[in-house]
Amino acid sequence: MQVAASLLGDPGRMPFVGHFRVSFLAKPDGRASLAAAGRIASESGLVPGFRAAREVESALLGLCTSGVHDRNELLRRAWTALMDIAACDLGPVGGTDMTIILAARDARGMGIAGVGLSGVWGWSGDLPGELIPLVEGAHPLLGVPGLPATTPGVLTLDAPVEQVVAVPAHLQPILPTTDTLARRCGVHP
Amino acid sequence: MSTVNDLDPRRDISLIRERLDLCLHRGEDVTEILEDLAQRDPLALADLVVGPRSQPSAGLISAALGVVETLEGAVSPNGLYRRLMDLAGSAAPDVLEIAAQRHPAASFVVQLSRQVEGAEAGRTHLRAAAGHPSFTAACWAHADAGHWAGLIAAAGETGLPEPAGALAAMGQIDRAAEATVRTLERTPDSPVVATLAAAWGPDITPILRAAVGHLRTRDAAHALRNQSAGYPEVAALLNTVARGMV
């Protein structure tokens, strides 16, 4: 039931300035799960980016999931938790540069939401390394960064994937080769 | 007035070489001779010091470092310092020191470092490059070359966060952890944890856990704990560890 989300890092020596990533099962029985990955205040410097990213992680990990069995409710609570963070804790530009992908899963399927993305792929877990694009063209999931004022729409997947991988809007929607993908997303086994 | 000022640097170069050799054989300082030649004929100076007929001599190379700016005008730094290193003998560390000071961004200094410092390659270079815009690139170059011990030493000597970041970027978890602690021992508010996250990825828990084993002082434990507040499990562990330290 657990799902994982990751975001491609920038090229260069410090690819993950302002990156964050969390995943957890809803309490108490883990019948729904949430994963998030993103970046914030990445252009504001190492330390502001780091602090803002930890704030986002803390807000998501601290959200109340008690008795939540529905993926859409989990996503709604996640957005609310993000919108409740004080702007001053989200870096010098107050979260207007936030990129995030959220993936929530329950017994009936999967929902994906996000902002600031140029591409989203999924891995079903069947074939090693086979990532399939989940959105194409001018899909509402793809767009400019920034913490939204209202809850964004959800892309529903009837057949859940185990992992989602996203590319931030400022990068071309191209994934690196599968042998380097995890490392390029800052994921280490 | 040097002992060769009566000689023409081009026409009498063999004679000058003989006088230089004699002085070096007697253990005399040849700085004055080299300074004289540097003023009169840099190309002749370069031929005498690093030319094909030059013989290894720590005394000559030590003196040559005093006129290295002139030599750089005659020979490209890359070739010059490699040749100086080949001829330097016991003066090799001095050659590395000067090369690192004058060319902190040059990639050839990475190779020279390995030649001179062996297991601790990078220590001199990174100390010289600290504060220079090329410091980050130099850390990554030494990490690429596998100079782990030198990076850890540089972390402790400079208190800068990049050596630990470079080690993390190479997947050297335990070495990055050790460099992190050495950095904090030197400079408690160095943003080393943020640098690790920027270089390795957002979940640096494995590195922070490994760092606990390298802690030697309570101050470093507190510094690491303060910077790890965003990782509650590690922060709790560090609280316990810091309380137990003298």
Image (cartoon, coloured by chain):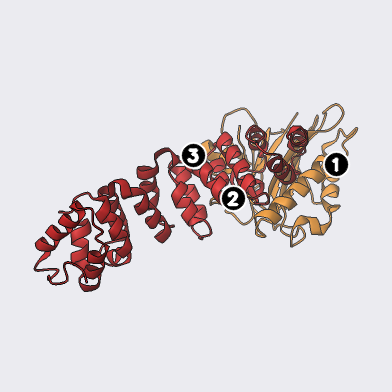
Q: Is residue B197 above or below residue A162?
A: below
Q: Is residue A48 left or right of residue B26?
A: right
Q: Residue B149 got which mark?
A: 3
Spot occupied by residue B201 in the image (x, y as percentages of width and height): 63, 43
Label 2: chain? B
Mark 3–mark 2 CB contact (< 8 Å): no
Q: Which mark is residue B159?
A: 2
The residue at which mark 1 appears reads as A63
Chain A drawing hue = orange
Q: Nearer the viewer, residue A92 or B154?
A: B154
Viewer can see residue A55:
yes
Callout 3 touching callout 1 (CB < 8 Å):
no
Q: Residues within 10 Å of mark 3 (few under 14, many from 20)?
A: many
> What's under tag 2, amino acid-wise?
Gly
Query: Which residue occupies the extreme right position in the image?
Result: A67
Query: What is the x, y in percent for residue A110?
Result: 76, 36
The amino acid pointed to by label 3 is: Ala
The chain letter under disc 1 is A
In terms of sequence position, does the residue under pointer 3 or pointer 2 come before the other? 3
